[in-house]
Image (cartoon, helix red, strand yellow):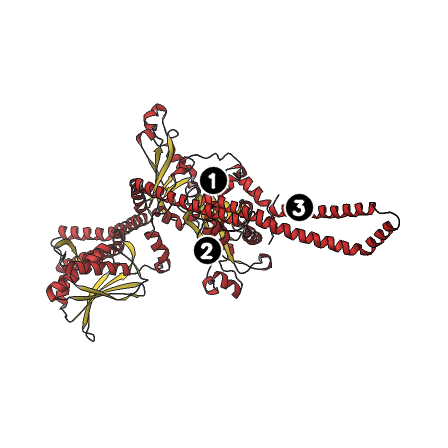
Amino acid sequence: MSSRAKLIAAAAVACLYLLAVLLAAGFVLGSGLEGEERALFSAMLDRRLGVLLMIALFACVFLFLMLRAAHEFLVLMPARAAEEARAMLEEPATRLTVQGSSELQALIVAVNRVAEQHHDLDETIEARIRIANASAEADRNRFAVLMSELAQGVIVCNPDGLVLLYNRRARALFAGSSGQGMAALGLGRSIYGLFDRHLIAYALENIDVRRRNHRHFVTATESGRLLRVLVAPIPEAGAGAAGGAEAGAAHGISGYMTMIEDMTEAFDSESTRDQMLQELTESSRGPVGNLRAAAETLHDYADMSAEDHRRFLGVVRAEAEGLADRIEAAARKYAAVLKARWPLEEMLGSDLLVAARHRIAGRHSVEVSLEDVDPGTWIKVDGFSLLQALTYFAGRLHDEYQIRDLSLRLTRDGEMAQIDLIWSGVFMSTETVMTWELDPMTVAGESTPLTVRDVVARNGAEVWFQRDHASYRAYFRFLLPAVSGQAENAPAAIAAMVDSRPEFYDFDLFKAEDTGLALDDRLLAQLAYTVFDTETTGLEPSAGDEIIQIGAVRIVNRRLLSHETYEQLIDPQRSLPAQSVKIHGITAEMLAGQPPIAKVLPVFRAFVADTVLVAHNAAFDMRFLELKEASTGIRFDRPVLDTFLLSAVLFPNQESHRLEAIAARLGVSVLGRHTAVGDAIVTAEVFLKMLPLMQERGIRTLGEAREASEKTYHARIRY
């Protein structure tokens, strides 16, 4: 029975007791009277019955108020302190709220002091543990760096095909697969969402575990990328020694690793080369035959007339020139393919200029400044060779013309990027510039066989020398192809490069789970969750309000995977009320050009596949999704847990179950409030704090959590 129900029951009992006492007193008084006194007493009761009932009612109200105050002071406040104490066991940084009587306040202060001392002791112990584990942490970081920087995509799975590790390259390979690649790749997800199960099975069937053998296959993604996949087993400890003759692909495997290489560009390059060779061969047969016939005629008929001799020589010359033109055209056509095969990297042009500035200043003691640098221009270059060329030019300017002040400039002209190395006061001849371009580069005493022309060819660029007589300045200009579309993706690209070692692995997933149980019977700690939130145009889904943003984050093996998130703005195809903009900050301009809900829900449905949904006040968000079932055909039929209802289960005596209040109670920092993904992350952290508290209350399985939630008073709320 809830605390509120207990209070009402106690007040009812007290009122009944009061009425019973009054009735008993009246009965005792009336029974002692006789004759005229009894008649007078009865008449007085008849005349004053309403007044007596009003007095009794006021007495009951007064009694209820006194009981409620006593209940608040003596029951609720200690109960709230007890709930906060249980939460403090899971989050030692939190403290009890000082409240209640002076005796209770003294107790709470003492508990907080003990908790503070215990927390300080825990921090000291954890600091010592961190120092002791520094070597293991360093090894883990080296492993993380190695995996994140591999050029091949790597995915490691347990025997059931559940992903327990992937690196940044694998994430990039599948990020653009029909818009659902990242929905399919994630910790705890099945690799069979990426590759045909039969291809993996075929590769594993042909693996000899004892010899650490491997097999590979070639497959294509939905987006048309051609991938070469190598599958290698991960033997169990001691499998090699104990395997014997019966060891094989089906024995001694604790999992397997796939290494994935994108062959699309190499395949296209080889196909282009083969096509050009075929075309060149076919087009050359006729001219070669004509040349051979003309040569044989000239040899066999040495006494032919001068006119015939000139005519045959003309045929030879014409066929030779035509053949040379075809070969030259093929060479020019294949030149782009050859350049593409040289490893080039996409980078911000401003980053290259900053590196060039430091390199030139360090090699030649030259002052280098940056001017008019476009911060959003991306280029695809061999950065090192281009740095060498810029440093080489700066060195020759310094050594031969005593130039001590240089400037670097980056501008964009359509599809091209322009990098200028600028100086003032000295102009050299075109012949000198040509000599510099053709000489092997020497930088600070270090020689390389490459010339500036080689660097330009390698990067598919052009370079020239130009004078600006009006400003008495000159510059070398490198004209480079700009990479289109990168400026818009710069923040995400930079974040991926800077933070390239996220929680992309969880080796606890090697342990096989008992998946034979019904979902409601599985332990909460074993389940995978998608915690989500929506931002909307208003609070009435049934009255036409629409979703304008969905944000979600995954929890696997009790870990919040901050790099496996989903976030999408949505065009509501209706006006945006000003009052809603004040709450979430999403404007109509931000929603212009975004996809409608019908295109977003299939991708979001793929992201939440095979997980339990979690939200705060989930009834509100789920109602919006339910109303879109008829128009989109997308149904979200996964089980749902609500942190709002779970808070009412765990903290029934607390006044507020708002997300901010629960977060403060559990020591969770609230950042990015009223953004969909920000609220989803806060809700996920709150939910993780709730898991051990639910276990303490005997709520261990999904079914028990859902049943407990449905019994709360707040479960009656409907939208």
At which x and y percent is residue 358? 21, 59
Q: Amino acid at mark 2?
A: Gln
Figure check: 162 above or below 355:
above
Q: Amino acid at mark 3?
A: Ala
Tell me the CA gap for discs 1 and 2. Answer: 29 Å
At which x and y percent is residue 521? 53, 37
Q: In what element is the residue under mark 3?
A: helix
At which x and y percent is residue 581? 50, 63
Q: Please say if the residues under marks 1 and 2 sit with CB atoms less than 8 Å apart.
A: no
Q: In what element is the residue under mark 2?
A: strand
Tell me the CA gap for discs 2 and 3. Answer: 50 Å
Asked which quadrant contains residue 366, the reply is: bottom left
The residue that label 3 is drawn on is 9
Single out the mark in the foreground, 3 or 1: 3
Query: In the visual, does 652 lie left or right of 119?
Result: right
Quadrant of the drawing holding the C terminus: bottom right
Q: In what element is the residue under mark 1?
A: helix
At which x and y percent is residue 122? 38, 43
Query: In the visual, does 140 lie left or right of 622?
Result: left
Can residue 74 be seen here? Answer: yes
The residue that label 2 is drawn on is 568
